[in-house]
Image (cartoon, rainbow, N blue to C red):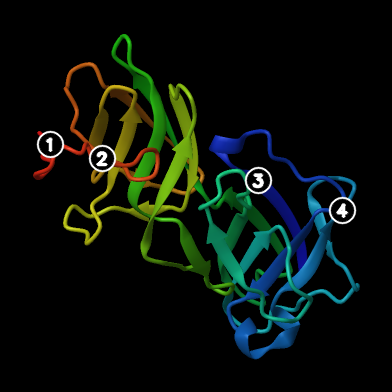
Amino acid sequence: MTVTAQISAPSNSNLAWTAGDVIGIAAGYGLYDATARNREYVCQADGTTFLQSANLPMYVKGATNIVAYYPYSGSDGAEPTLALNTKDQTNVTDYLFAKANGITPQNGSHVNLVFNYALSELKMNFTIPAGESVSTCRLEGFSQQATVDPYTLDMTLEAPETLVVNGTNLQTVTLKLIPQSITVDAAVPARLVLIGTIRSYTIDMSQVQLTGGQVTLANINLTDGIGSVDFVPGGSAWEDSGLGGNVTAE
């Protein structure tokens, strides 16, 4: 099997192969065959052709799917662990995934792989009331970790986790997120909480659907609503006034 590959990533149009880039390739039956799992293919000088690093190319021995990923991890012939993690937005692995269906010995002498950016991007622009500024952005109800089957590229999402972005005056926030569909009746509601200097704002995000390789743009206008009061522990502490009785807040 000879291999060529391209990158199709509208959200990251500057991505391109360079000589020496390494991709991992597996066949659908690779789970049972070490000669067809996590094979190490290296990009050549033309930026399109990939050759097996040990000059032992894969052979298509029956009807299968060919899957591939980048950047390469693990070792040739050993099942890799593919995990997406977007909890730390300063350190997100930009995985690329490719899949070619219906490969047979008759058409598998050459396989062209089209790689797509594995993650989705959520870009949010905030229109903020005069005299207000937003210092913290909390995205809730979205999974920030997932495992990926190296033979099918199917994703298994982990439980939702809160993603926090801090700043002094947040006006535009771009997040790299795992592709996922949000349901209105999810156990953890999908919402965006913005903590401002005057008040906080809670935005329903249950209609947001994230697709790999695509940018979802949300223009959020905070000037039309008074927001909601949100007491956040950590930045300050309650102190006893010494007046006695119970403290109430409205």
Foreground mark, 4 or 3?
4
| Residue 42 vertical position relative to residue 6 in the rendered view, above or below | below
Q: Amino acid at mark 4?
A: Gly
| Neighbour tally class for label 2: few under 14, some 14-19, many 20 plus, Cα within 10 Å | few
- Disc 3 versus disc 2: distance between alpha carbons? 46 Å
Tell me the kind of residue under disc 1.
Ala
Within 10 Å of disc 1 (Cα), the crowding (few <14, some 14-19, many 20+) is few
Q: Quadrant of residue 64?
A: bottom right
Marks 4 & 3, CB-CB < 8 Å contact: no
The quadrant the N terminus occupies is: bottom right
Q: CA distance from mark 4 to mark 1?
A: 62 Å
Of the numbered discs 4 and 2, the one sitting upstream in the chain is 4
Lower sequence index among marks 4 and 1? 4
Report the front residue among 196 and 246: 246
The mark lying in front, picked from 3 and 1, is 1
Is 118 placed above or below 124 here?
Answer: below
Figure quadrant of residue 133: top left
Query: Which dot, 1 or 2, sits closer to the camera?
Result: 1
Q: Amino acid at mark 2?
A: Phe
52 or 184, which lies in front? 184
| Residue 141 seen | yes
Q: Residue at x 18, y 52 (%)?
A: 184
Q: Earlier in the sequence, mark 1 or mark 2?
A: 2
Picture layout, residue 167 above or below residue 87: above
Q: Which residue is mark 3?
A: 7
Q: Quote the CA–CA distance across marks 3 and 1.
A: 55 Å
Query: Residue at label 4?
Result: 20
Q: Please say if the residues under marks 1 and 2 sit with CB atoms less than 8 Å apart.
A: yes
Q: Upstream in the sequence, badge 4 or badge 3? A: 3
Q: Label 2 near label 4: C-beta < 8 Å?
A: no
Which residue corresponds to mark 2? 231
Q: Residue at (28%, 40%) from the top-left corner?
A: 239
